[in-house]
Amino acid sequence: MKKLHVLIISVLLIFGCAQEQKKTILEVEELLKEMTLEEKIGQLNLVTPGGGVLTGSVVSDNVEANLKKGNIGGLFGIYTPEKLRKIQELAMSTRLRIPLFFGADVIHGYKTIFPTPLALSSSWNMKLIKQTAQIAAKESTADGVNWNFSPMVDISRDPRWGRVVEGAGEDPYLGSQVAKAMVEGYQGEELSDKRTMMACVKHFALYGAPEAGRDYNSVDMSRIKMYNQYLPPYKAAIEAGAASVMSSFNDVDGIPATGNRFLLTELLREQWGFCGFIVSDYTSVNEMIAHGMGDLQDVSELALHAGLDMDMVGEGFLSTLKKSYDEGRVSEEEITQACRRILEAKYKLGLFEDPFRYIDESRPAKDILTKENREIARASARETFVLLKNDRNILPISKVATVALVGPLADNRADMLGAWTPTGDDKQPITVLEGFKNVAPQAKINYAKGTYISKEEAESEGADINTLIKEAVRAAQKSDVVIACVGESRSMSGEAASRTDLRLDENQRKMIHALVKTGKPVVLLTMSGRPIILTEEVNLPLSILQIWHAGVEAGNAIADVVFGDYVPSGKLTSTWARSVGQIPIYHSMKYTGRPVSEDNQTEPFRSRYQDEQNEPLFPFGFGLSYTSFEYSDITIDKKEIRQNESITVSVTVKNTGEYDAEEIVQLYLRDVVRTITPPRRQLKGFEKVLVAKGESKKVSITLDPDDLKFYNSVLDFVSEPGEFQVFMGGNSNAQLKETFKLK
Ligand code: GLC
C-alpha cells in the first residue's frame, strides 16, 4: 500500500509541478531515458573541493576522478571563472555532457559584504534587503556561482544560539517579508539571466529552536507552534519561488529533518506545492547515523524515501543507493525523480543551452566590489544601527570634537565582516578609526585599544589589561567625548557558536567602568552578531548604539551616524533579554492563566521570576532616534467586519525633535478570545516613514483577512469571530489601541 501511495504521489507531483514548466520537462524526460542508474545517482552528489568554507569535519576528495565519471551533479565553495571553466570542461567530457551548477554561501554579500542578516532585518527596509540580494547575485554570478545557500529564514528566540545572526529574528510576519525580498533579489524575474542565481531556503526546518540554544540540538515542537510561529518564513520563500531548499541538521519530533518525510514531502511538496529540489546540509545524511537512525546505507535510503534529492559532501547516495536498488530497498522511480529535479534546475539556469553561461572572465573586474556596490553597502549599514540609549543626547557628536576612540573593535578590520563571509576579503572593510577620519577629518582622535575582545585572546597575547585600560582612560581624559567600540568578534556568532553567557567580556566591562569614572560622556558602539545582555551597561550614564557587524563599509557608515550625517532608524527584530534566564523571550508570548497584572507586579502566585523581571531589557521593535516621535489619533475605518473584509488602522506620528528622521511605525494585533490560547500581541504590519522635524504624518496600515487567521488545533488556517484589538506605535509595547469585531 505504501509503495502505491508513494507512486501515486510521485506521479501527481511530476504532473503537478510540470504544469508550470512544461517547456523543460520534455527535454529532461528525453535525457533521463538515456541515463544509466549510476549516472542518475551521480547527479545527486554535491561536493566541495575545499578552499571554500569548512563547516563540517570533511571536504570531498577525489573530486576530479568523480567528475570524469559523471559522479557529481554540483560543486560548492570554489569560485572564479578560471577555476570553474576547467571544472565545467571536465563535466563536458563525460558521456552525456551534463553541466554542473556551482553553489556558495553568500549569506550577506559576495565580495561587497553587507551587514549580517540580523542587522539587515533591523532596517525593516524590504526594498533595501532585496537590493543587497540583487547585488550579491550579480557579484556571485560574475565569479561563476549560480546557486546560493541563502536565505536562512530560521526563526529564533534564543540568542544563545550563534546562528541567530544569520536570520531575521523572532517574528514570523517580518521574517516572511525578509524571506520574500531575498528570494526575489537573488532569482529576479528569470533564473537563466546571467546576473541571477538560484536561492536555497534554509534550514528546513525549525533549526532555530534547538533545545538550550545549543547548535545542532534536538527540536521538539507542537504542530500548532510550528505552523503559527516557525514555518511561515519558509512558506513565504517557497511562495516567492525559491528554486531549492536545504534540510537542517536537527531532528524534528524525533526524526532528523534530512530523513523526515513529513517535512520534505508531505509539508513541502504536498501541502505547499514546492517544485524545486531539496539538498541536505553538510553531511547531514551521514549525521543521521549519529542521530541513531542506522548505518550509511540505512540513512541514505531514509533520506531518499523522505524526499531528499541531493546529498551534500557525505556521498552516502553515491556510495550506497545502487546497492539499495539492487536489494530492492529503493526504486529507480525515486532515484529518477530526484535526478529529474536536479536536471530541471539546470535547465532553468540555462546551463543545457550554454554550460559556460555564468563563466565570463571579463565580469569580475566590471561587477565585483564596485564603487556603487560599496555605496549601497554603506547606505544599508546606516539603516541597520539601533540606538538603544542616548544619555544626555551625547550623540551625534561634533565633527570638530576631540574624540577618544577606544576598544578592541575600534581599529579592527576583519571582524567588521561578521559571520559567514567565506567569499569576503578581510582586507577590504573600512575600520571605525578610518571611517572617523574620512567623515570628520577636522576631529582630533585619540585612539587606544583599551583591551582585547575576549579574555582568552588577551591571555594568549600575554596582554597587560590594566595597562591597556589605563591608556584608554588617558585618551578619555584628554578628550571631549569617549567612543568605545566593544562586543563580539565575528567568530563569536554563526555556526557552532552557542554561548551561555551573553554579556560583554569581563575586561571590556572593566574598561567601560573605568571610562565612565573619568566623568566624560561615553558612547558604546556595540558590535555583535546576536542580541547580547547589556543590563549592567544600560544602568551607567552612557549612550549605546548597536552596530552589529556592519560589513565592508562599516567604518564609514558608523561615522555617518555618530557624526550626525544620518539619523539612526533601526529597530530590533529580536527581543533583548535582561538575563539569559529569561530566554526564550519574545513579544508574542502567551498570557498564561496567571499573568502579572500591570498595576500589581508583586501579587503572589503569578507567572513571574523571583529574581528577575518578566519584561525584557529592550522590546521587539525598539529603537530610538536623534529626534523624538509622538503618536496620537489612532483610528479604524470599521468597527465590525465580516470574514472576507479588510480593515485599515491609522495613526498620526509627529516628529517633536530637532532632526528630520525615519520612523518604523508598527501595528500589533491581539485576538482576544480564540480556540487556542492567543499571544498577547503579534506584529501584523509596519511602515517606515520619513518625518521632517516639527511635521506630522498619518500612517495607515491595512489588515487583510489572512492577517486575522491562525492555524487552529486541527491545523485549519482560520479566523474566528470575536473581539480584536490593534495597537500602533514605535515598538511592540505600543499603547495606542483600537478595537473591532469580526462577525
Ligand atoms: C553548513 C551550514 C549551511 C551551509 C553549508 C554549506 O554546515 O549549516 O548553512 O550552507 O554548511 O557551507
Image (cartoon, grey):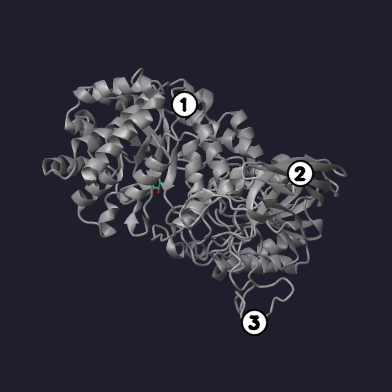
Inspect this view and state whether residue 142 appears.
Answer: yes
Furthest residue toward right: 694
Q: Position of residue 12 (x, y in %)?
A: 32, 34
Residue 545 in percent (x, y) is at 69, 54
- The residue wearing badge 1 is 142
Left or right of residue 695, residue 674 in this image? left
Depth-wise, is mark 1 or mark 2 nearer the camera? Answer: 2
Say what secondary structure mark 3 lies in: loop
Q: Which amino acid does label 2 sit on?
A: Asp
Q: Which of marks 2 and 3 is in front?
A: 2
Front residue of this view, candidates 149 and 497: 149
Nearest to the observer: residue 400 or residue 17: 17
- Residue at 72% across, 63% down: 474
Mark seen at residue 637: 2
Mark nearer the N terminus (2 vs 3): 3
Is residue 416 visible to the viewer in this orientation of the structure?
A: no
Q: Are marks 1 and 3 in contact (CB under 8 Å)?
A: no
User: Is 307 situated above or below 409?
Assistant: above
**What residue is shown with label 3?**
604
Distance between mark 1 and mark 2 Cα atoms? 50 Å
Q: Could you tell whether 45 is left or right of 272 in the image?
A: left
Q: How far apart are marks 1 and 3 (CA)?
A: 63 Å
Q: What residue type is labelled 1?
A: Ala
| Secondary structure beneath label 2 | loop
Disc 2: CA contacts within 10 A as few (<14), some (14-19) or many (>=20)? few
Q: Which residue lies furthest to the top in this view?
A: 353
